[in-house]
Image (spheres, coloured by chain):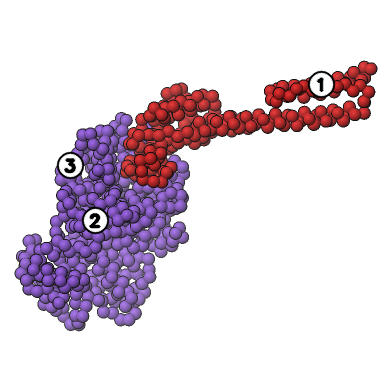
Chain colours: A purple, B red
Amino acid sequence: MKRMSSIADRLSWPGGGGGNARRWHAVARVVSLALFILALAPVFAWAQEPERDSIPTDVRVGILYQPVFRPGIVMPAIAVEAEFQELADSVRAIVLRDLDYSDRLQVMRVGEDVPLGGPVNYGLWDQLGAVWLLLGGIEGTPEAPVLRLSLHDVVYSLLQDVRAFELPPLGHADLRHAIHLAADEVVDWATTSTGIAATKIAYVAEGPGGSEIYVVDSDGFRAQRLSNDGSIALSPAWSPSGDRLAYMSYQNGDPAIYELSLNPGGSTLLVDLPGLDLTPAYSPDGSRLAFGATVDGRTEIFTYNLIDGCCPERMTYARYANSLSPTFSPDGSRIAFNSDRLGQLHIFVQPLPDGSAELLTPYIYDRSVHNAGPDWSPTADRITFHGWVAGVPQVFTVAPSGRGLRQLTQTGRNEDPSWAPDGRHIVFASTRNGYTGLWILDVESGRIRRLVRGLGTRLPDWSGRIDSASHLTNEAAAGSNNIN
Amino acid sequence: MTRTWKKSTGWLGAVALAMVIAACGGGTPEVEPAPEPEPEVVDTSAEDAERAAREAEARRLREEEEARRRAEAERRRVMSILAERVHFDFDKSDIRADAEEVLQRKVTVLREYPGVALRIEGHCDERGSNEYNLALGQRRAEAVRRYLASYGVQTSRFSTISYGEERPLVNAQNEDAWGQNRRAQFDVTNPGRLGAGN
């Protein structure tokens, strides 16, 4: 019954690699009745496929998601000696979750009983509906295990790629990150796109003296507090290298920009101009920091030279108005930022160092417009922000030219979006199911999942790809455990 | 006779001194005690003087206490005027008419006590974006500072800080709570002579 009938066969996928017939298989958890319907109407099946917290239930006019084809991938259990069993199970669980969260592959729970000895039986996997087959093996010693992953193209009956990944031993703080890196590699092999598993999200949540900075893995595991200021900490922003965070803190009374190092941890003062210093953002090359600071009682945007540790330079000139929340374009030549200079709160784009600011979001006469929190996609083509719809913030994206404005959310308050390095996922703060929490949205399919939940969780910032697990070494992990 | 007179002058002197102190204190409407000359009692005069001194001391303490109480009342009056919050309209940093009344009272007090320095905190309701509210709170604090300065109070007597929406006064989601949370509040950073004893 698990097998899809041949009605779904002989479907050719545009751009799917050679127009070869590919087979669709429903996931194991779909009930048999649904299977029957799927068999009759396979196209319908793709559209309704996301089962968890999916947006499609609240799709209305103005929020459009495309039904997205995700090629099926299957990863049988890793057959290992007893001493590696626990490690093998964690590896498989983590990799499968990462593949699923990439939203580019359909993880299929089939073939649990398929014998794995001998050469790969492509015909069998093809019949089960898989497009990709991921086989794992673990070698080496329990102290220095090596994970071997091989990805097979079932449709073409060939080995796509294979690689050995050195892993830290079971129980080591870096193990999850090492597995995330391997999972991203698989996503790259199968789709030639950037994976997002080996990334982290920094955010603000309640702390003893107000709020503190936290980080969590992209799969929602290992949430930990990083700052220990006992005051108000806000607006974390990742350095491009992923080993540091700039943020705003009231730890010495006067709000200033500080930097948190993930290894070995600890907070150091970065910039403190007179008055308020807020909303830091690193330039993509890491050489400059853009931030807001007080000028004559209002807020203007400055840049600061991080290499020489000097020279705040003012970037915006809007008398009687605030300019803040800068975000760099991926080439570092422009910033998008937030300003109330037109009497409404809008997003502007401005070339650096001395271009003129241009309005990005539509000016609506006589309306309470409140667009804020811009974040420029690392893949350059979109800027996300939140804007009010009937007084409630919702997440939007727009091209840097101002074209193609698109609303992505509409349930609850949805604020402060931040792009993943793949330019396809967005993390944002939301009250969609009654709690405050952070949620991740795939802007193409509309699939959505909760990342963390908790009092006052907000202002998320998604890191770039974090290449080395050693950024969070044992000392750092131990240090933050002490804080907790 | 001269001796007795001298003694009684001494006694009278003590009474007079006490009265002067009492008068200086400007306090209780105490009827001056009629001087009852007791010419022949030489032995008790030392005792009397002592008693008088004690009474004078007690009176002085009373007066002091009274003065302290009055100063305290004054201090409390001044502090409550200084602590009065002002409120703002949504997404605005303009000084409203009701806020102007409050600030005028502050101007009077600040002129009266030139040593007093204030920290002005700008706050917002929770509806706007977290980050924008920090900037808005700063503008509110600054608007208040400007207003006070425009009445001749030195700007250097004020410092400003914004807490955005991070320190709400009322934790609720309704118009009333929001209205109360959109505020500037005041912290006396230097009490001037209000703090220096009496």
- Describe residue A323's horizontal placement relative to residue A122 as left or right: right
Q: Amino acid at mark 1?
A: Ala
CA–CA distance in space, label 2 to label 1? 94 Å
Return the x and y of residue A349 as percentages of the image width and height. 23, 40
- Describe residue A314's horizontal placement relative to residue B5 as left or right: left
In this view, the residue in front, A225 or A173, is A225
Kindly check if marks 3 and 2 are in contact, taking CB atoms under 8 A apart as contact.
Answer: no
Image quarter (top left, top right, bottom left or bottom right) of the N terminus of chain A: bottom left
Q: Which mark is residue B34?
A: 1
Q: Which residue is mark 2?
A: A441
Kindly check if marks 2 and 1 are in contact, taking CB atoms under 8 A apart as contact.
Answer: no
- Describe residue B196's horizontal placement relative to residue A285 as left or right: right
Foreground: disc 2 or disc 1: 1
CA–CA distance in space, label 3 to label 2? 22 Å
CA–CA distance in space, label 3 to label 1? 96 Å
Query: Element at badge 1?
Result: loop
Query: Please, which chain is the residue tagged with disc 3 on?
Result: A
**Residue drawn at 36 percent across, 30 percent down:** B94
Image quarter (top left, top right, bottom left or bottom right) of the C terminus of chain A: bottom left
Residue placed furthest toward the top:
B2
Return the x and y of residue A332 as percentages of the image width and height. 24, 45
**Quadrant position of residue A333:** top left
Foreground: disc 3 or disc 2: 2
In this view, the residue in front, A159 or A98, is A98
Query: Element at badge 2?
Result: strand
**Residue drawn at 89 percent across, 27 percent down:** B45
